Structures are given as structure tokens and as C-alpha cells.
Amino acid sequence: MGKRAYNVLAVVAVAMLALGVTAWAKTYTFQATSIVPGATGTIDAKADKTGGNTNVTISVDHLARPTLLTPPANEYVVWVDPEDGSPQNQGVLRVGDNEKGSLKMTRTSSKFKLMVTAENEAHPHSPSNRVVLRADVQE
């Protein structure tokens, strides 16, 4: 086999590996509510190799700073609502002047709901009724 054939095989092998890695992750789309109807967002969920954890990356766009809402809020908080429990605060979703934000987290389950709420504080014990984005994840 010539050098060119080896190069072609190498390119094919790399392409197949890239496709395989991409297939392991799923992307979900947030649904915006009437509070911020122009907001968009995605959730990239990828089960780890052992299947025990799910790595989650949230990315949002066109999400106004919470202080610009009516009535204004101080923070956006991400909540995980598992099938078998109460919603859990996963942290503050920081949104810049460019109306973009992101947050990474790891979950022990692969099936849950995600919500982003407008809150007056960073660490509320339960989500407010001001849900701005929501999605179901089933990795």
C-alpha cells in the first residue's frame, strides 16, 4: 500500500471516530416562556463512559439581563427537577451584556427536567413561578 492510501485510511479513521464521539452526546432545546419569549437555549448532555453520570452544558442566547425584566429580578437560577424528588438549585446562570450565558454541571441521573427561573436571590430554597426556559432531558 502506498503513502497516499495510508493517508486516506487515516482520514477515514479520524472521521469515523469524530462521528462516534458526536453520537454519544445529545442536544436538547430549551423552550422559552412569555417572560422572555425571544430567549433561546440548548442543553448538551453526555453520559460518561461508565454510564453513572451525565455531563450537562447549558448555553443560552438572547436572554435579557434579569434586572431588565418586568418586574426586575437579580439572578437567573438553573434548577434540576428529577423524576423522584424536589427541584434542586444548580447555580446561577450568568448572562452578559451580549445576552449570552452558559453553565456546566454533572448529574447522577440521565432523565430530568431543567428550568431557568428569574429570582431575587442566588440561593432560593425552591423555584419561583417565573420560569423563563424549560426542557426535558432523557440521555
Image (cartoon, grey):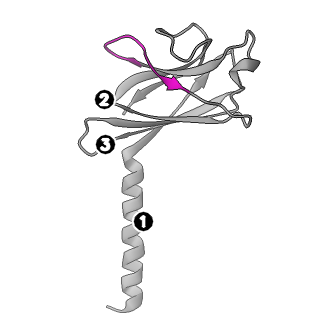
The question of residue 13 being in magenta is answered with no
| x and y percentages locating residue 4 in the rendered image | 42, 88
57 lies above or below 5: above
Callout 1: SS: helix
Q: Are marks 1 and 2 in contact (CB under 8 Å)?
A: no
Picture coordinates of residue 76, whole percent (x, y)? 60, 21
Q: In the image, is 82 to the left or to the right of 134?
A: left
Decide which of 48, 33 is in the foreground and name it.
48
Residue 46 at x, y percent in the picture: 38, 41
- N-terminal-most mark, 1 or 2: 1
The kind of residue tagged 2 is Thr
On residue 95, the disc is none
* Amino acid type, callout 3: Asp
Residue located 58% across and 24% down the image: 31
N-term mark: 3 or 2: 3
The reply to whether discs 3 and 2 touch (Cβ–Cβ < 8 Å) is no
Task: Reply yes or no: does residue 83 show up in magenta.
Answer: yes
> Mark 1 Cα within 10 Å, few/some/many (few <14, many 20+)?
few
Q: Residues within 10 Å of mark 3 (few under 14, many from 20)?
A: few
Separation of residues labelled 3 and 2 (CA atoms): 10 Å
Q: Is residue 97 visible?
A: yes
Residue nearest the viewer, comparing 3 with 86: 86
Q: In the image, which disc is placed on residue 48?
A: 3
Q: Which residue is mark 1?
A: 15
Circle 2 residue: 108
Extreme residue in the bottom direction: 2
Q: Nearer the viewer, residue 42 or 122?
A: 122
The structure residue drawn at horizontal position 33% and vertical position 30%, both measured from the top left corner, is 110
Residue 137, position as x, y percentages in the image: 42, 28
Is the N terminus in the top left, top right, bottom left or bottom right quadrant? Answer: bottom left
Judge from the rendering whether residue 44 lies leftward or rightward of residue 119; answer left or right.
Answer: left
Magenta residues span 81-92
